[in-house]
Image (cartoon, grey):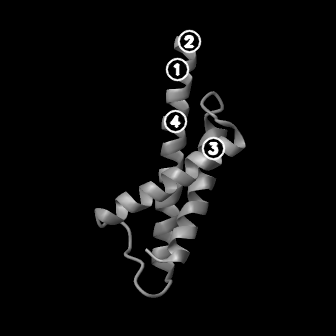
Amino acid sequence: MNIVSLLVTLVSGAIGGNAAGAAMPEKSLGPIGNSLAGLLGGGLGAGVLQVFGVMASGGSGVDFGSVISDIAGGGVGGGIAMAVIGAIRSAMNQKA
């Protein structure tokens, strides 16, 4: 994964985390929390998808297919991470 691919994945992860926070306000971590969870999920999600061969490898150049793949993987990973962290936080607050 090259630096452009990593940056695209992280930014789309942050956007995905904030989109998931807007869609589920009861699980939202706030703008900064959603962004951080999205960054984490975007990076990890893209890495996992690349290991399984779902995402384009990134090669030596930047092409349209790999950028779209990075955006999709990062956005979905960021949204899922924010939702999971938000659900865990909500469950912990209900028990306390």
The reply to whether discs 3 and 4 touch (Cβ–Cβ < 8 Å) is no
The residue identified by callout 2 is: 96
Q: What residue lies at 70% left-to-right and 38% top-to-bottom?
A: 30
The residue identified by callout 3 is: 34
Q: What residue lies at 37% left-to-right and 75% top-to-bottom?
A: 57
> In 3D space, how far apart are the residues under numbered discs 3 and 4 (Cα atoms)?
9 Å
The amino acid type of the residue labelled 2 equals Ala
Among all residues in the image, which is located at the extreme bottom?
60
Mark 3 or mark 2, which has the lower sequence index?
Answer: 3
Q: Residues within 10 Å of mark 2 (few under 14, many from 20)?
A: few
The residue identified by callout 4 is: 85
The residue identified by callout 1 is: 92
The amino acid type of the residue labelled 4 equals Ile
> In 3D space, how far apart are the residues under numbered discs 3 and 1 (Cα atoms)?
18 Å
Q: Is residue 3 above or below residue 39?
A: below
Say if residue 18 shows up in the picture: no
